[in-house]
Image (tube, grey):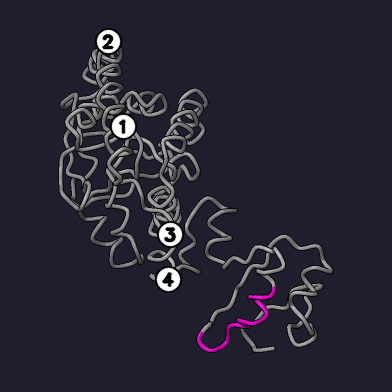
Amino acid sequence: MAENETAIRGAVPRAEIASLADHAIALGAGEVVLAMEERRNSLPLADLLRVKTTGVHVNDIASFLERETGRVDLATTNPSFLIFSDGFSAGQRIGKVSKRLFDILASLAVLVVGLPLIVIAGIAVRLDSKGPIFYRQPRVGMFGEPYNIIKIRSMRTDAEAAGKAVWASENDPRITRVGRIIRKLRIDELPQTWCVLKGEMSFVGPRPERPSFVEELERELPYYAERHMVKPGLTGWAQINYPYGASVEDARVKLEYDLYYAKNYSPFLDLLILLQTVRVVLWPEGAR
């Protein structure tokens, strides 16, 4: 065993298995997962073919982890896996049209119903601290195109006095008293439904990041640009599964969820995300 390898209790060395197919049948296995760091000229093709033809499912580690964790594991993913695996069908015409239709109808409804909340929150923000009620901020949208989000201001006007973008953190001291409340209730997000109505965003999709953060993350994380192949959203698969994100490492985990969403998009997945978002709003344990 090499120095960098980890011994797994109960594992049987491959050299001690005469027939991989017979071994799988003897164990009553329903699936064989291939987890090899180097496949070139080392795949046991004859054994795997025999396993497959005996009715046992053969899978690779990247697909297995994606299915079991609900995210695309960057450590085991390579370009060929993303190219040749199923998925990334969010751009298909029927799905695209139905998603856009839902966004238009839902954003109109939210703007009408949420208008009183926006007015009340705006008055509270103005009474609580000096500065504008709303603020606009550049974000990176679909295909990397920039646009401006509109939110109710929840931080002090000098939150970034140095002129440099700063990650939001849990219990961020820059958040005002009213800002903390409207963030927990997600009221500060309501004006963004105007961006959804205009088509710059969707209700469900990867959360849009600021251009300066995107430049940094594209340098640090593989496949980060691929999350911009779908519209950014008010809520997303990453937000309901990993609520906090204040570092490059957090962004890496969120990227794995975003890639899973882009790869496995369906109306049913959108519905699940929306239902889970309602749960988070009612029990806001992850609000930031």
Task: Give the foreground label among 3 and 1.
Answer: 1
Kindly indicate the quadrant of the structure image that contains residue 237.
top left
Q: Which residue is mark 4?
A: 78
| Residue kind at label 4, given as amino acid type | Asn
Locate the N terminus by quadrant: bottom right
Task: Give the foreground label among 3 and 4.
Answer: 4
Q: CA distance from mark 2 to mark 4?
A: 49 Å
Q: CA distance from mark 1 to mark 4?
A: 31 Å
User: Which contiguous range is marked in magenta?
Assistant: 40-50
Task: Give the foreground label among 1 and 4.
Answer: 1
| Residue kind at label 1, given as amino acid type | Ser
First of labels 1, 4 by sequence position: 4
Q: Residue at x 58, y 83 (%)?
A: 43
Q: CA distance from mark 2 to mark 1?
A: 29 Å
Kindly check if marks 3 and 4 are in contact, taking CB atoms under 8 A apart as contact.
no
Q: Which residue is mark 1?
A: 98
Q: CA distance from mark 3 to mark 1?
A: 34 Å
First of labels 2, 1 by sequence position: 1
Locate the C terminus by quadrant: top left
| Residue kind at label 3, given as amino acid type | Glu
Name the outermost residue toward the right: 26
Q: Which residue is mark 3?
A: 249
Q: Left or right? Give the position of 151 relative to 11.
A: left
Kindly check if marks 2 and 1 are in contact, taking CB atoms under 8 A apart as contact.
no
Q: Which residue is mark 2?
A: 116
Instruction: From the top left corner, tell me how far across and down residue 163 is, in percent.
Output: 16, 50
First of labels 2, 4 by sequence position: 4
Up the image or down, 224 lies above or below 16; here it is above
Under circle 2, the secondary element is helix
Q: Nearer the viewer, residue 243 or 31?
A: 31
Q: Residue at x 49, y 61 (%)?
A: 73
